[in-house]
Image: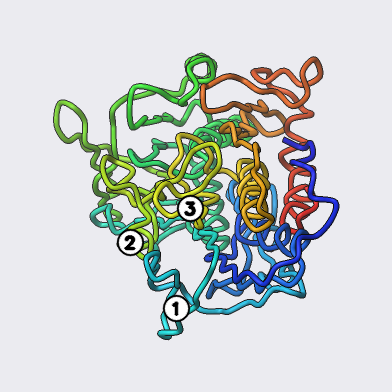
Amino acid sequence: MLGPGPVQAAQRVRTSARIVIAGAGAAGLAAAARLAAQLDGARITLVDARKEHYYQPGFTLVAAGIKPQSYVVSTTAEYVPGSVELIEERVAEFDPEGKRVVTDSGRALPYDYLVVATGLMLDYDAIEGMEVGMIGRNGMGSIYHSPAGAAATWSALSTFADQGGVGVFCRPATEMKCAGAPLKYTFIADDHLRRRGNRGKAELIYNANNKALFSVPIVHEKVRMLFRDRGIRTNYDHVLRSIDLGRRVATFATPEGTVEQVYDFINVIPPMRAPDAVLNSALRWQEGAWGNEGWMDVERGTLRHKRFPEIFGVGDIAGVPKGKTAASVKWQVPVAVDHLVADIAGRSSDALYDGYTSCPLITRLGRAMLVEFDYENNLTPSFPGVVAPLEELWVSWVMKTMALKPTYISMLRGRA
């Protein structure tokens, strides 16, 4: 997780290639930095309308009352290499046949190579009755929405920790970024209640979307045991479909039909899908759930598009079995860049992404489990013999709350 990525080429490759990077989040900025460092003469264009950059791994910490809202906010421009052009517009259309990207102003950007790093879309509209303007009010929180949403969620959770009642936690039935975050927030709520002497006044319920709490079986079992020991009730095959914010009632779809759940606090995690520009393009998977959700049809080892070899997909948008975390970006981007640069240089690359994903799973304030795994659900600890992946450790907490952000910033600059 904190170790170096693949070594960059010692000598820059001379080229006049036009490279467009769609999206200036973690994956797009990291790709821009590495390409700028390895290529000489390339015209690299980064396209993204959002001026703010969000350190999304910190949203949970803001929503836990551990970090201020400002901790997760910076600017996109400060991480853009000097040789890279930043176009502050939204990507409206991908035209892989014509090898061009079209922005929302109608500007066409031709390319020789394209890196798609658009991230994903939080589909709050898929939940009937949901209003994002209500986050932080009437006991409803949502840690994913934004820095302000995370701070508002903390306000709602803090009130719940003072008063007790029924707390409901869940996750969507779609692919999602950092699937451990809903679990972390359940543990955080439990600990805040205990610290305020109100755990006996509260019932905590976690509604899993399927029959597992975590995609890695051994981690599922560990979380199941921790939930049991801490009195957190688990319901499987429960998916949030609608919410009545005034009545504080959430409706879940189950195999037996819909079930209403009254709550005093709820952490809403919306369904997630590809942005419209990818969803409505030829870049997405052509069938199955990944096609319906719009994820890019890339080779899982190289991140290269299966039908358009000059296109790569990295970060949340990539349609691969694992990898919607910042830690995954750290390992995906060097692989995709190595293959792209190899194409330009007329050589081949044997770099492969093995599905590495990391989840510093907070289990109480001051303790976390550093869970790292790959495509095959193998645990892949970065510090074997030092940090046990399924132990609740202070050092793992320190990594999450202190060490990861500097590493993340180094990744954006192409140095990690």
Q: Which residue is mark 3?
A: 309
Q: Nearer the viewer, residue 75 or 355?
A: 355
Q: Which mark is residue 281?
A: 2
Residue 16 visible in the current orientation = yes
Tag 1 or tag 3, which sits nearer the N-term? 1
Which type of secondary structure does the marked residue at label 3 adopt? loop
Q: Nearer the viewer, residue 304 or 123?
A: 304
Give how far across and how far down residue 47 sits, in percent: 55, 72
Whether residues under marks 2 and 3 lie with C-beta atoms below 8 angstroms apart, the answer is no
Q: Which residue is mark 1?
A: 103
Tag 1 or tag 2, which sits nearer the N-term? 1
Residue lying furthest left? 257
Dot 2 surroundings within 10 Å: few (below 14), some, or many (20 or more)? Answer: some
Give how far across and how far down residue 234 sits, in percent: 38, 23
Determine the image quadrant of residue 255.
Answer: top left
Q: Residue at horizontal 49%, vertical 41%?
A: 163
Dot 1 surroundings within 10 Å: few (below 14), some, or many (20 or more)? Answer: many
Q: Nearer the viewer, residue 344 or 279?
A: 344
Which type of secondary structure does the marked residue at label 1 adopt? strand
In the rendered structure, the answer to whether residue 67 lies left or right of residue 22 reads: right
Which type of secondary structure does the marked residue at label 2 adopt? loop
Alpha carbons under labels 3 and 1: distance apart: 22 Å
Amino acid found under the numbered disc labelled 3: Pro
Give how far across and how far down residue 110 sits, in percent: 49, 75
